Image (cartoon, coloured by chain):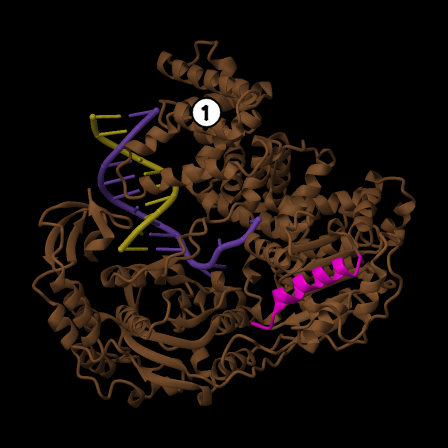
Chain colours: A brown, B purple, C yellow
Amino acid sequence: MIRMTEPSKITSVPDHQPAAGGIAARARASVGPKYLSGLNPEQRDAVETLDGPVLVLAGAGTGKTRVLTTRIAHILSQGRARPAEILSVTFTNKAAREMKHRLGQMLGHAVEGMPWLGTFHSIGGRILRTHAELAQLKSNFTVLDTDDQVRLLKQLLQADNIDDKRWPARMLAGLIDGWKNRGLTPSQVPSGEAAVFANGKGGKLYASYQERLKILNAADFGDLLLEDIRIFREHPDILRQYQQRFKFILVDEYQDTNVAQYLWLRLLSQAPTSPSFTSPRVRGEVASQSDAGEADSPQTELVETAPHPDALSASEARRDPASGAREQTPHVKNICCVGDDDQSIYGWRGAEVDNILRFDHDFPGAKVIRLERNYRSTGHILAAASHLIAHNEGRLGKTLRTEDHDGEKVTVTGSWDSEEEARGIGEEIEQIQRQGEKLNEIAILVRASYQMREFEDRFVTLGLPYRVIGGPRFYERAEIRDALAYLRVINSPADDLAFERIVNVPKRGLGDATVQMLHDHARKRRIPLFEAARAVVETDELKPKARGSLRDVVAQFDRWRAQREVTAHTDLAQIVLDESGYTEMWQKDRSADAAGRLENLKELVRSMEEFENLQGFLEHISLVMDRDGGAEEDAVSLMTLHSAKGLEFDNVFLPGWEEGLFPSQRTLDEQGRAGLEEERRLGHVGLTRARRRAKIYFATNRRIHGTWSTTIPSRFLDELPSANVEITESKGGSAWGGTGGYGASRFDDMEAFGSTYSTPGWQRAQANRNRSGGRSGGGQSGFEEQASSFSSSSGPDFGSFSSRRRGPMTIEGELVAKSTGTTSEFSLSDRVFHQKFGYGRVTKIDGNKLTIAFDKAGEKKVVDSFVQRA
DNA sequence: GCGGGGCGGCCGCGC
DNA sequence: GCCGCCCCGC
């Protein structure tokens, strides 16, 4: 546990550029510069404590980003460092952009001068490019994403005759990622762990994967940090150079750091004047002899072969190399980490909550500052969130408080099934909208992405604008990856993965057989696939058709490479996309998303303008391209709890609080108590996104992977403080038909719901309850019947639709009113196109409401403004 | 070599 | 329920 420690004394001001003495002096006074004036005492402390390690425990909504940016502004205005001497790392591009933006506002000008503000990976990659040759790479190396990684591993598995059904490449990719997250190179992976894959071949495969990466002149995301760490350890002179450069280090979301990131930070945060720290984490004594400046490789051998007979747990992997340094005097320089252990939700991808829990052990003399004053949520919401998270044991403990009024209580609403849940939420949203609130201030946060479908369907029917946050990121889309692959082959002929990806896209009659042949050829001669292709077209090994096709491809690339010298890179990209037939391929495609893909390609070409040349663009694309920002129009946001971190909304809807879904059964199975605590933190994150209204839902029946099952309310519901929570009835007509299984819950109390209901669904629920288990069987069919009556296309059913519910009359009335006033411009059996569902035919018209039989998506009700004539 | 249909598997998703 | 993969027929 971290205890509060005395602030470290301000030692010596680093001897660089002369500060404006006046400003510095003024800062000492209690008034201070203007940018400090709006801060509360704790925030101000976090900003002004510049020397020594500082951990800022910043609860949700306590002004974390503000502290970080103000701290940078403070460092700059105090003349303690120049912009290029501040290392400031975040996890996401979004967070980095946000900081740049706010800093720009604060300083009143753009922040070109903050070259080391970025994500761990972009900065790690930048360092690696500078010293690429020390990692057997060229500085123009390609950054592979997960997809490339898996394809490469698949090839390795095939080469080794390993059945990739039994031992999927994806699994191996996960293992390797995990090892890299823990800072382990192939030789450092504990043999017990390496053996779990493919009967002991895991470690060897990791090693040969690394070799292949070097040949392809490529690095994966993990390498961007791991290779840095290796270079730092093997070349103390290089490390020292960075230590001297970075006078201040700032880290955002410290609770999400993994072991590799921790090691990377530790190395950089050692004071440069203390050579014994240059390689402290190289296991102990061996390293300390190395600092005389004589390098390096001999002792790294020793270092890397540290024998660990058994599985090294993640925390051991971290603690062990760290321990040497911990014993020593803290010549750690000015590092400030900001985080919230209660918002650590990325354990599954290698984050070590332990990093933040042990901060003061890792950085002796650390000052810990807690930000507990919340500026976001009302009293009831904050109380509910705090109460929930208090059930976790492994936490540093913070008490969030607000001076805001209590506001509305958090509501908990049970529904009969997930469709009713979606209907109810839809209605509440329309009600909120009628009160004049913006849809932009409404979010639905789900645990699993499959929950989104029902909301989307519902919103489409209602004509309620929504946007899905998350989903595949921009550069992960197939069309973007294809386009990039073309550019990668132009830029780096050795990039076999890229070549293989597009050699037959669009279709050119170069299938598996041809590619296999090229592979054989390339391996024999130890040349890249592209060069193999060039050689093969000169022989008659291929059938004439394939041979001609391949010759064309090679010639095209030669031409493009020549053009590269004389053509702007954006023009070149356009030329490549057009001449390769790639654009045409999508133009001919009639599927619903083809238009969007063409739009994405345009956007890709546009985005290239920001970069000087093709090389610069490719270096950054996989590290800095975000999903497209999306339109600014007013719309409800739909996203997972994970992607909601860092966002806030006036109104937050939290559906699906059921055992198995939330907390997720799989997390509980795989990670036990730690998993449960992480799920609970996820709940805490969800609740604290809300400013004024937080509404929780659970359904008794839910369709998961296509089959209905009965569920019980989440244990988290019982952990909410009753004083701050109101149990309400579902607007959609509600029933709770489960018969326990999760012990005594106040949500087992039937009186809380349903007593006023007489809907068929409710009656069925009653019947169901009296049956043992209440699981599927008769209940299921009854409930399908109910469900189908809602989505049925027969008859003008909006009237009956609403009459069976309590609240919705007005809503339907409004829709009907709207529809009688306007005659639809569509006619029966018109061919139409819908952004989401693709092409279809109108089968029924009811005012502005159309029923459309979609070619792929089946029959749907849609408001006519959402479709266009095909 | 290509495209269609059948079958198994499926949380979260940063860089 | 949907997607991705594999096998098969053309």
Image quarter (top left, top right, bottom left or bottom right) of the N terminus of chain A: bottom right
Identify the residue at image location x=82%, y=54%: A280
Q: Nearer the viewer, residue A158 or A477?
A: A477
Q: Looking at the picture, does residue A288 appear above or below residue A21? A: above
The residue range painted magenta reads A60-80
Query: Is residue A402 part of the magenta span, yes or no?
Result: no
Image quarter of residue A402 = bottom right
Q: Looking at the picture, does residue A839 appear above or below residue A735? A: above
Query: Is residue A78 part of the magenta span, yes or no?
Result: yes
Image quarter of residue A839 = top left
Of all residues, the one furthest to the right in this rendering is A292
Q: Position of residue A469 (x, y in %)?
A: 42, 57
Q: Looking at the picture, does residue A813 appear above or below residue A766? A: above
Identify the residue at image location x=17%, y=65%: A818
Identify the residue at image location x=44%, y=12%: A541
Image quarter (top left, top right, bottom left or bottom right) of the C terminus of chain A: top left
Q: In this view, does A83 lie to the left or right of A453?
A: right
Q: Nearer the viewer, residue A641 or A150?
A: A641
Q: Main secondary structure of the magenta part?
A: helix
Which residue does the numbered mark 1 point to in the structure image?
Answer: A516
Q: What element carries label 1?
A: helix
Q: In this view, does A348 lie to the left or right of A758?
A: right
Q: Nearer the viewer, residue A746 or A305?
A: A746
Query: Label 1 neighbourhood size at 10 Å, few (<14), some (14-19), many (20+)?
Result: few
Task: Give the chain letter at badge 1.
Answer: A
Amino acid on which disc 1 is placed: Gln
Residue A315, visible in the rendered structure? yes
Residue A308, visible in the rendered structure? no
